Amino acid sequence: EAQVTQNPRYLITVTGKKLTVTCSQNMNHEYMSWYRQDPGLGLRQIYYSMNVEVTDKGDVPEGYKVSRKEKRNFPLILESPSPNQTSLYFCASSLTSGRADTQYFGPGTRLTVL
Amino acid sequence: AQSVTQPDIHITVSEGASLELRCNYSYGATPYLFWYVQSPGQGLQLLLKYFSGDTLVQGIKGFEAEFKRSQSSFNLRKPSVHWSDAAEYFCAVGDFNTNAGKSTFGDGTTLTVKP
């Protein structure tokens, strides 16, 4: 089944403890992206990747890192999480970054930073 | 910079009634516009998209949207709402032309369907 998977789905952690949220897609998509969703703020793009080893900042990259060493994986790294990073995170992928490509979203990761 | 505004935070309609969700965008060139739906506890699913051609776009689940350049709008419509349409709806603009991959979403509109 074609899908985007994220792990973990739920995570509670404490301030400053490094964490990684994994994202994997099995559709051979070139483009991958991370978003955070907060009440009243919609989805905001954190980072995106046009292809392997190519990443770029979205609208809210501060406090996050990403890497794209393989086409299928695009982990989101929080080196020193803070409470304002408590949010619902979505990973998405599309075939290319082409004009009208549909983004396919993962199920989301709900992160709480205490 | 591109932006998307969904003026209605919450809309309630009766089952069987028609629906229109508003979306206004700001973008310097021809936009690439999308509507996504998010059911509770789920990720986002594409309903429809517009990038060129006919300004009335048909999507899944009986939804359609009309691109109006003069009004910078891309409103989503459905003639008869079903209870299963209750969800959150997001309008998005894709800057896949110059900024190569940047997406901007609206804040979302929550749809409640009354029996």
Image: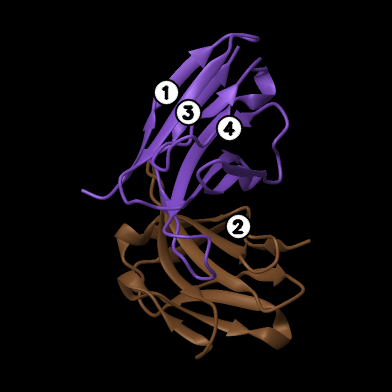
Chain colours: A purple, B brown
Mark drawn on residue A110: 3
Q: Are marks 3 and 1 in contact (CB under 8 Å)?
A: yes
Of residues A105 and A65, the one nearer the viewer is A65
* Of labels 1 and 4, the one closer to you: 4
Residues at marks 3 and 1, CA–CA distance in whole angstroms:
5 Å
Q: Residue B48: image x %, image y %?
A: 43, 71
Q: Earlier in the sequence, mark 3 or mark 1?
A: 1
Any mark on residue B58, and which? none
Of helix, strand and loop, which one carries label 1?
strand
Is residue B115 visible in the rendered structure shown here? no
Q: Name the residue at 58% across, 32% down.
A: A66
**Residue assigned mark 4:** A66
Left or right: A77 as drawn, with respect to A92: right
Using the rendered image, report if marks 1 and 2 lie on a common chain. no
Q: CA distance from mark 4 to mark 3?
A: 18 Å
Q: CB of mark 4 within 8 Å of CB of mark 3? A: no
For the residues labelled 2 and 4, the Cα–Cα distance comes to 16 Å
Q: CA distance from mark 1 to mark 4?
A: 19 Å
* Residue B101 numbered mark, or none: 2
- Identity, as a three-letter code, of the amino acid under mark 2: Gly
CB-based contact (under 8 Å), mark 1 and mark 4: no
Q: Same chain for marks 1 and 4?
A: yes
Q: How many marks?
A: 4
Q: Amino acid at mark 1?
A: Tyr
Specify the subunit that label 2 lies on: B
Q: What amino acid does circle 4 point to?
A: Val
Q: CA distance from mark 2 to mark 3?
A: 25 Å
| Circle on res. A10 | 1
Callout 3 secondary element: strand
Give SS at disc 4: strand
Which image quarter is the N terminus of chain B in? bottom right
Report in which chain the residue with disc 4 lies.
A
